[in-house]
Image (tube, rainbow, N blue to C red):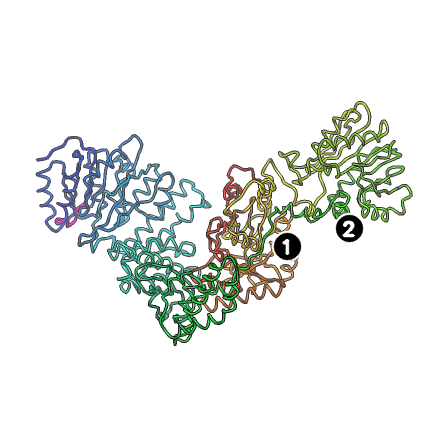
Amino acid sequence: MVTVSKPVISFLIPAYNAAETLADCLGSLQRQSVSNWQAVVVDDGSKDDTWNVLEGLAKSDSRILVHRQANAGASAARNAAARFATAPLLCMLDADDWLDPAFIQNMLPVADGLKPVIAYCSYRRVTPDGRKLGVETPPDLTGDRAKREFSSFCALAIHAVVFPKDLFVRMGGLDVELQTCEEWDLWLRMAFAGAVFRQVEGCFAFYRMKTGSLSRNPFKTVRDAIRVTTRAEELRLKEGLSQSDEDAQWTAPALGQLRMLAWAASVNLCTGTDLAELAKLLPEFPNASGYESFLAEVILHGLKVGLAVERDSDLVALLERWKPAFLELVQLLERHSLPGTGRRIEELIVWPISAADRSRSFALGHLQVVATDIGKLALIRKADEADTLLLHLYAGRHHVGSHVAALWGDLSIRAQADLIINELKTADRLPTPLTFSYARTWATGAIRNARVFSKIMRQRRGRRRQLNHLFKTIQVTALVGPAANAREDDAGLPEASSHSKHPLVVTVSSDVSPDVEDKQAYLSEAATKKEYWERFFERPDPWNYVSVYEQVKYEQTLSLIPDGVGKALELACAEGLFTIKLAQKVGFVTAADISCRAVERATERCRDLPNVELRVLDFVEGELPPEQDLIVCSEVLYFIDDEASLEQVCRKIAAALKPGGCLVTAHAHLRRDEPDRTGFDWDNPFGMGTIKKVLSNLPDLVLEETIETELYAIHRFAKRATATPVVHIAAHGVPLDANVAKYIIRGPAGVDREAAWANEVVTSIPVLMYHRVALDGPDSLRRFRVPPETFRQQMQFLRRQGYYALTAESLTNLLRKGNPIQGRPVVLTFDDAYLDFLTDAFPILAENGFSADVFVVTDKVGGRSDWDARYGDTAPLMSWGDIQSLHRQGIRFGSHLASHRPASSLDNATLLDEAALSRDALERRLCEPVRSIALPFGSTDFRVPGILVRAGYEIGFSTKPARTSFVDHPLSLPRLEVRGDLPLKAFAEMMGQPDAFIG
């Protein structure tokens, strides 16, 4: 008789007709390395010999306590067992399962503590015939992950968990109304009660799979899952967890219920009426689009459990057993989801099954998997319904490579050879056929290239390399050539092989930063400053002097000019707009500029003013007219080379003033000078801050009055001994011209764009995805709608942090070069071409100096977003006139297909036609090549990139949430979605700078 006082853990074991398995179950406890345990076994109204077996076992081991009750279900039996348990820790063990001898030894130290800690470990399923399947490792449940996971699913085996008895009692035990999922419900309630879940490394629990168990009843399983997920939502709401939380999508009851339906239907291979009735149980059948990968994992796990197999590849041999049920489930999901969802799930099931054993050929839905030997190529017959080929190529037993593309028909030997040579780049693996046809083709190629051969032989260097290349070209042609006479049809050529027909055009991109590039347009070959300014004034009004911004500054400057001024000197008068205003306030004006062109225009403008004299003067190098009552010198001093030269010029200006005379000067705040405030990021050596400091330090001048604005300051200095400075805070003129606004950086110190260009390189690029920039619209689409003011703050953040915008075309060039990219690039993309891009987004982009790519639904141009109709009011889209106008202003446009239908919902021919027609419509309207595309809804699949290449596209964007890097497929580049339902801080976090100022 084995006896133990004070057990450390009690096992709660319900037993119903378990006579055959109880000895193994309790025997696993008796073999534990830790002996002070207790087993409380409750016979739940068994009709077999269970009670007699229990009595016999209990007589020989006092650690086993047995009780008997009328049949009330497993949950009631466990609750009853808990009342008799005397240990502080509990574990729920089924009568047909068992534990590893080291279970208590490993689990106890983790679970035994002052806090309510729940320990859990991995487990294995065991088939009825005794085969142990793979180890199933639960997810990480630390922190709030436990709440999130148990709100949707339960990944813990019931007997792989150890928990405190007092917590179990506080939770009220198991829900006796649940026939299945009862442990899931308990873990959920414990998680929301604050319990801490800690994982124990190792597999110490074994779960016996048996037919007829409650878990194999899909209707009971789904009904109980609905009850648990509904409770989870109630707990979330009670705790006040935000519905806009990033993880809320995974914890929504509808998704958890769909997850259980997919798993239960897969385990039980439900078809026909059973599947339809199962679907009717769901209170809401959610759209599975966006969750394809997640559901594919659930379905794949369910199939392996239901068919009692361990490896993914084992499913191929059983394909005919599960294929009908799987395809029906996929069709069910497709009917309630975005079109094309089913195809994506098919792909995500086929890929792991095929990857686990590439030597197996099979067809499933739209996909056909073919394994072929490169030395034994034969015609590949297209399977019914298949439109996508996954080809695994072997050379004997060696896997050479895999290729996936659209399948248009039977795949000929010639098509396969072309694919091997041009796509898989494995021509050296092709066997050399000893046939007359091959020899004749080889000889013909050699004769045609005789002149090239002769030329190579006459060279002194590099002959071996060029000869090898020539012979390889002849051989490849000869290998493919004989297949041209084969009787097979070439219709099945995978479209990805058309890369050779549509090579990506690589344009050499500029190696200077965007800002530097703008300035070099003027400086390009100027030898002197005078020549620079002559070039600058080639275009009249280069600074847009008539803008509201400049005119307000003029009026503010005039307000600081004292009355009764006799002689005034205006330095850097440009084209004379301010000269006219100044002449009305003073007796006589001498206006000067370094540029002859500027002075000529100013002379013409002021020809009717008798008190104005114009002259060409380099005031930095030349002498100034003396005895001036007033000198006006604005927006020019920061073009002086350095601070020492600035001081010399300022002394010269002060010397030209009469005693009591005034200097009025207006200059902008520059970030280089004052990095902690809003200012311009011009590359001048200094700005208003330094100019004011130098002038204030001159012994002859004192500061009398200042007008301070956010962007510039206007000062009046007087040539006298003392003064009491007066400061006026004023506003600058608005709206700002885009050519002014794009140089402004707002807020505290950030990163200088040119400094980032010079000092930083990146290998991945954030491609940002926007839809609408607007306030109005259906609440259910708030995620896709960024308010204009939020968008402005985001663009200002990018500008402040030194980012510059790439277009899709320039991104293509950089990715093709494959070198690290200088500075901080970003790509801004906008899907659908909403009208609010023109009215709200573009002005903000322009004022921050950013370009963008907009993807157009070409059949809907000028209409409304009818694809949004099910959510509420639709939004207007831009017209062709709007698009053409923006294109002239530097916005790039690409395709969003013609109809906004998901690409995965279209057959090969329809997708090809729509992609080509959409590109053609854009090219006709814009009169330039269009090579970029973003697919509606981000819907793509294995065959899509190849079809897009055939339609003439070079770069394409998906909705996969990641930064774009050199390893990404050029037609499936990831993007980071900018969501309108997240706080502004989330944008900084997405850009990898969570602590940077934004807003």
Tag 1 or tag 2, which sits nearer the N-term?
Answer: 2
Neighbour class for label 2 at 10 Å: few (<14), some, many (≥20)? Answer: few
The quarter of the displayed image where residue 674 is located: top right
Residue 325 in the figure: left or right of residue 39: right
- The residue closer to the viewer here, 846 or 41, is 846
Residue 973 in the figure: left or right of residue 851: left
Could you say where residue 759 lies in the image, as x and y percent from the top left? 56, 40
Tell me the element at label 1: loop
Magenta region: 14-20
The quarter of the picture where the C terminus appears is: top right
Q: Would you say the residues marked 2 and 1 are in contact, meaning their CB atoms lie under 8 Å apart? A: no
The answer to if 264 sits in the magenta stretch is no
**Above or below 116: residue 179:** below
- Provide the residue designation for mark 1: 890
Residue 690 visible = yes
Q: Name the residue located 75 percent from the left edge and 48 percent from the top edge.
A: 535
- Provide the residue designation for mark 2: 540
The type of residue carrying mark 1 is Gly
Residue 859 in the figure: left or right of residue 903: right
Could you say where residue 663 lies in the image, as x and y percent from the top left? 80, 32
- The residue closer to the viewer here, 124 or 543, is 543
Residue 334 visible = no
**Above or below 627: residue 683:** below
Could you say where residue 851 lies in the image, as x and y percent from the top left? 61, 51
The quarter of the displayed image where residue 876 is located: bottom right
The type of residue carrying mark 2 is Pro
Q: CA distance from mark 2 to mark 1?
A: 22 Å
- Residue at the far right in the pictured view: 610
Could you say where residue 796 lies in the image, as x and y percent from the top left? 60, 43
